[in-house]
Image: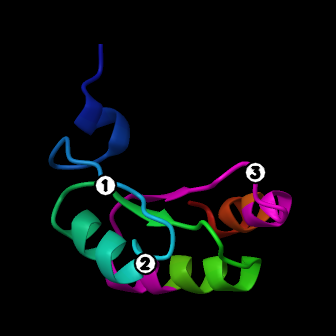
Amino acid sequence: MPTVIEILGTKYPIICGAMARITTHEIAGVVSEAGGLGILGAGGWSADQLRDEIRQTKAMTHKPFGVNLMLQMDNISELVDVVIEEGV
């Protein structure tokens, strides 16, 4: 049975808590680069903002990171499309 770090592709079993408008690329990128799993908190973001944050995170690290999506957002389908298009 694989371990959490094997599943996530991280060095440590540490997952950054996603906080809307707080966990931006500046936090998620550093957590991922340090060996944890950085998570972008996309609550309240437009599709363009999310795409920009994903690209800035990718510029900071080539390690895995994730995006937390709030399913009740009016633009959830657009956000899901961005996450898929950006390969997160």
Tell us which disc is closer to us: 2 or 3: 3
Category of crowding for the residue at label 3, using alpha-carbon neighbours closer than 10 angstroms: few (below 14), some (14–19), many (at least 20): few
The magenta span reads: 56-79
Tell us which disc is closer to us: 1 or 3: 3
In the rendered structure, are the residues bearing label 2 and label 3 in contact, judged by CB atoms less than 8 Å apart? no
Marks 2 and 3, how far apart at CA = 20 Å
Q: Amino acid at mark 2?
A: Thr
Q: Residue 19 occupies which quadrant of the picture?
A: bottom left
Query: Is 74 located above or below residue 58 in the figure?
Result: above
Give the residue pinned by disc 1.
37
How many numbered markers are drawn? 3
Q: Residue 34 occupies which quadrant of the picture?
A: bottom left
Q: Amino acid at mark 3?
A: Gln
The residue lying at 74 percent from left, 58 percent from top is 80
Give the residue pinned by disc 3.
72
Category of crowding for the residue at label 1, using alpha-carbon neighbours closer than 10 angstroms: few (below 14), some (14–19), many (at least 20): many
